[in-house]
Image: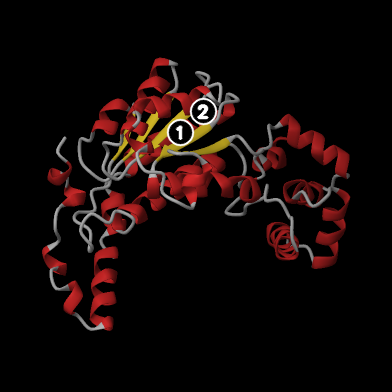
Amino acid sequence: MNLGSLVSETRNPETFDLDNLSTLAMVTKFNQQDATVAAAVSLTLPQVAQAVDAAAEALSAGGRMIYMGAGTSGRLGVLDASECPPTFGVPHGVIVGLIAGGPGALLKAVEGAEDNEQLGISDLQGLNLTANDMVVGIAASGRTPYVIGALRYARQQGCRTVAISCNPDSPIAREAEIAISPVVGPEALTGSTRLKSGTAQKLVLNMLSTGAMVKIGKVYQNLMVDMQATNIKLVDRARRMVCEATGCDAHQAESALQQVHYEVKTAILMILGDLPAEQAKQRLAAHKGFLRAALSGG
C-alpha cells in the first residue's frame, strides 16, 4: 500500500494556511479538527464492544492483553498498560505494552524498528505468548510491519487479535479478528498522526481497558474499587469511595480500610454486609471479586 494514498497522509484543505494564521486562529483550527474525532470513533463502537468482550474473556481465562505499536501508537499502548495496575489493581504483566525498538523508543525514536516484521514476532516470543492472550495491534497507518508480523504470529498461536487503525481496510485490519478503524481524515499538520489519529487511538484504548476491567469485576457502580491506595491523594480517594458507596462517615470508612490494608472493595462489603474483614474477603473470593454479586449473593 502506497503511503501517500492513505487517508491519514493526505493534505487537509481546511489547514493549507496554517503557517500564515494568527496564533489564536491556528489553535482554533486545531480544535475544530479535534472536535471531529469522537464522532469518527462512535462509528466503531460495535467493534470496540467486541474487543472489550474478547479482552475480558482473555483476562478471565488467565491470559494477558498485549498492546503492540511503533512511535506514537506504541507509546499510547505502553501508557494505557502502565496505568492499569494502579487504577484497577491488576498485577504488573497482565496488561502489557510493547513498542518497536524496546523501552528506549518511548523517549527517543528508534529508526527502522517498525519496519521489521520479525521484531514483532520476537517480542511476542519473548513474552512466552499463549493462546489465552489477546494481542492488540495499534498503527495509525494500518501498515506497520512490526504490528503486521505480531498479529499474524498471534493468530497462528490461537490468540484473539484486535487491530486499531485510522485508515479503512488497512493491512493490520485484515490480519486481525476484530478491526477498529476510526477514520478521522487528514491531519491538521499533514501526516502528523500524533494529532487526530493519536487522539482517536487513545479514546479507543481508554474504552478497551476500562471496559474490560468493568467486565472482570474491577468496578462497582462507577467506582474504581480495586484501585491501589499508594499515596496521600489515593488514600483520600479510597476513603471517599467507601463513603459514597455505603453512606457511612469518614471515620467508619477509615476504620474499615485500615482493617483490610486499604482494599476499597473489601471495606465496602464489610460495611454494607455488616461483615468482619476476613469473612468479607472470603465472600469476595467466592464471587470471583465481583462486589455486586458478593452483596446480593450472600
Name the residue located 39 percent from the left edge and 42 percent from the top edge.
70
How far apart, in angstroms, are the residues tagged by discs 2 and 1?
Answer: 6 Å
- Render colour scheme: secondary structure
Check if mark 2's residue and mark 1's residue have beta carbons within 8 Å.
Answer: yes
Residue 36 has which mark? Answer: none
- Callout 2 amino acid: Glu
Quarter of the picture holding the C terminus: top right
- Residue sitting nearer the eye, 65 or 16: 16
Q: For residue 95, which quarter of the picture?
A: top right
Is label 2 in a helix, a strand or a loop? helix
Residue 50 falls left or right of residue 283: left
* Residue ID for mark 1: 53
Q: Residues within 10 Å of mark 2 (few under 14, many from 20)?
A: many
Name the residue located 53 percent from the left edge and 43 percent from the top edge.
103
* Residue ID for mark 2: 57
Residue 68 image point, x, y percent? 43, 37
Residue 215 image point, x, y percent? 54, 38
- Residue sitting nearer the eye, 167 or 69: 69
Residue 237 image point, x, y percent? 70, 62
- Callout 1 amino acid: Asp
Compared with residue 154, is residue 171 higher up or lower down, i.e. above or below? Answer: below
Q: Is residue 77 visible?
A: yes
Q: For residue 52, which quarter of the picture?
A: top left
Q: For residue 143, which quarter of the picture?
A: top left
Compared with residue 37, is residue 145 higher up or lower down, i.e. above or below? Answer: above
Name the residue located 62 percent from the left edge and 54 percent from the top edge.
223
Residue 193 falls left or right of residue 94: left
Quarter of the picture holding the N terminus: top left
Compared with residue 267, is residue 287 higher up or lower down, i.e. above or below? Answer: above
Q: Is residue 298 visible?
A: no
Residue 54 image point, x, y percent? 45, 30
